[in-house]
Amino acid sequence: TNPGNSRYHHNLAPLHGEVNNTRDEIKHHRMAVEYNPGSSNARNDYGLALYRQGRYDQAEVQLLEAIAINKENVVAMNNLAAVYCKKGKFSKAQKECERVITLDPNNAMAHRNIAKIFDTLGNTRDAVKHNRIAIQLGPGIHGVTQHADTMTYRNLARQLVARGQTVSGHANAHYDAYRALAFKVNVLPNSQKTKELLIRTKTKF
């Protein structure tokens, strides 16, 4: 192994990714792993790059190795859950999310991911539960970007409507739709501008 060379390739790979040079991005991730096969982070990032290229079987191999090396690598577990979802293995994806939540209860990404799984399986009750937790944890925490948080609000609003929970107050589906639009246009959730947008778009979520 040569950790020094591994770091060089590991750092170089995302630079190629930023300019959509996926061939060299994958190449440098692969070389980072070859130079330091015992690096859980290098294998995770390689797996994630493969996932983004739709190479799910190869991504699964790397992410499983990343977790075998570091059994507390919750980032790799979240990524593996995403791979399993793409492969239609929702039971395995759910288990990975649950492993993350056991290790890190405040991992918003895991709550968001498991909510999507429950939603896909038609379990809106648990989907709502975990979307609410993800929202409470806030945007930008544990890898949840503002865009992802917006989608969480939209999903929650849709799930609440599906469950017929349109009562007034904080649990109102329309309130969550306000919040979704607020994040999108960067205004306060209850501002007049947000309400006008909501009316204009006829609450499309």
Image (tube, rainbow, N blue to C red):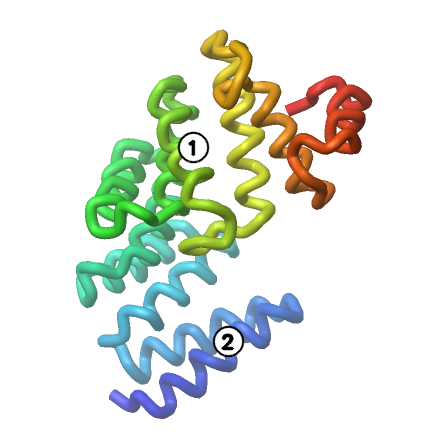
Q: Tell me: 141 left or right of 34.
A: right
How far from the left and from the top, in percent, is residue 196? 80, 25
Nearer to us in this view, 29 or 112: 112
How far from the left and from the top, in percent, is residue 41? 33, 70
Q: Residues within 10 Å of mark 1 (few under 14, many from 20)?
A: many
| Quarter of the figure with the C terminus | top right
The residue under the point 54% across, 44% down is: 148
Nearer to us in this view, 73 or 52: 73
Q: Quadrant of residue 197?
A: top right
Q: Which residue is mark 2?
A: 13
The residue under the point 32% across, 79% down is: 34
The residue under the point 53% across, 72% down is: 14
Q: Tell me: 171 left or right of 63.
A: right
**Label 1's element?**
helix
Circle number at residue 131: 1
Nearer to us in this view, 48 or 135: 135
Upstream in sequence: badge 1 or badge 2: 2
| Front label number (1 vs 2) | 1
**How far is disc 1 from disc 2 in space, using C-alphas?**
33 Å
Q: Are marks 1 and 2 in contact (CB under 8 Å)?
A: no
| Quarter of the figure with the N terminus | bottom left
Q: Quadrant of residue 121?
A: top left
